[in-house]
Image (cartoon, rainbow, N blue to C red):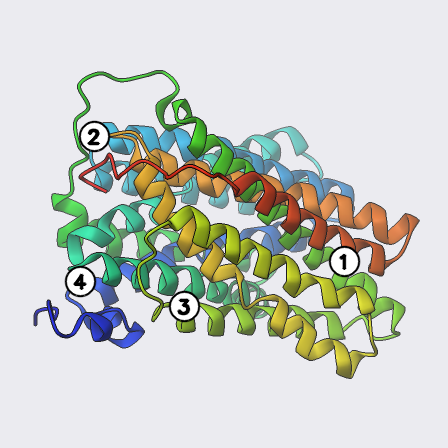
Amino acid sequence: MTMPDTASDAAAASTWTVLRAPHVPRLLSASLIGRLPTGMVPLALVLVVRHHGGDYRLAGMLTALYAVGAAVGGPVMGRLIDRTRQPPLLLGGAITSGTALAALMVLDPVGSPGLAAVAAVVAGAATPQLEPCLRVLWEHVLHGERAVRAAFAVDAATQELIFVCGPLLVLGATHLLGSSGGLLTAAVICLAGTVGFATASPARSWRAARPGSRHWAGPLRSGRLVRLFAALVCVGAAIGVFTVATPGYADAEGSLGAASWLIALNAVGALLGGVLYAAAPVARREDRRLLFLLVLLTIGYLPLTLTPALPGMAPLALASGLALPAVLASAFALVARLAPEGTLTEAHAWMITSFGAGNAGGSALAGTLVDLASPTTAFAAAALCGAAAASLSFSPRRPPRPVDSAA
């Protein structure tokens, strides 16, 4: 099976054509499976701590340490992959992370909080960098820039499945295997997905471009890339605000359980938006497209400040998710264009770290605003975060041409 090349450029960019391309089903599905623990471990840690009689403060601390470990370890592993190969680092990370999760199953986090904290950090830091590794492979398995951009959109959209399916898997595993079942399942799933990805032919044959000289700052020596990461911190903050403000709104409406449905609708909107964006043409000025998409993201959050009754909030929650995959897909393309030669995997890892750091900060901000002011104020903060991202992404100059031929 080969990809169309000339008259079928539009078809080559479609979601269906991308998904049918050689190696794509395996790479995408294995990556998603291996990344499911990202949506599983936080809830699994809470359930384990509570089972041992611990409070939410301890559960929150372990969850935060897991996230911090992932935020710090991601760029480090990305740099090592850029200097070596994908399979050894991915498989080693899966084994190490899985072992740390197994330790958390055996430990009593209440009786040994120090050991539990170390295990949480290690589990996060060793998380296999499947997401950046997938993105550097797209140009090796797809033909044409439009097909690659469509793959970025599909990639961004399908990420929503991680955060929809992850918690459900934890609940099912806990029901079948007991309080530690979520952590055990996360460890097994991580290893299975990573093995499937790392043993695929494109992952085994990939090699990063060899730069003439290396710089200690890696991709962070690109000022435009740093600005992009700063914008993504704000995008992550907007998502974090929404995630916490929505339960606050639902609680105020007298139906806390409705928060799950509103967040799920937001994810459905994101999935739909990503599929639609896959058909978009390649942008001549990706920086301008990203600015436009960030404006749309901001506009999508503004109606939430009306905080109507629950039936009216449902379509607003769905609409607020539509632009996010397009924003991420455009950011993926810019990272590929701006990353200095030989640093692309690390650059994508920094993107994930930036988004995650913003998400954590936005969650904390929203909690404070809901407590001290109102959910309406928190939703307004989400829109302000989107506006801040747009202002950071604005640049009147043309971005440099791609500099990493390995992409």
Mark 1 lies on residue = 379
Direction from residue 308 to residue 268 in the image, left or right: left
Mark toward the viewer: 1 or 4: 1
Query: Could you classify mark 2 by the number of other residues whose Cα lies within 10 Å: few (under 14), some (14-19), or many (20 or more)?
Result: some
Q: Nearer the viewer, residue 28 or 174?
A: 28
Mark toward the viewer: 1 or 2: 1
Which residue is most to the right? 372
Mark 3 lies on residue = 277
Q: Residue at x 20, y 30 (%)?
A: 84
Which residue is most to the front? 396
Mark 4 lies on residue = 23
How far separated are the C-alphas under marks 1 and 2? 44 Å
In primary-sequence order, the first of circles 1 and 4 is 4
In primary-sequence order, the first of circles 4 and 2 is 4
Q: Quadrant of residue 233?
A: top right
Q: Nearer the viewer, residue 84 or 343?
A: 343
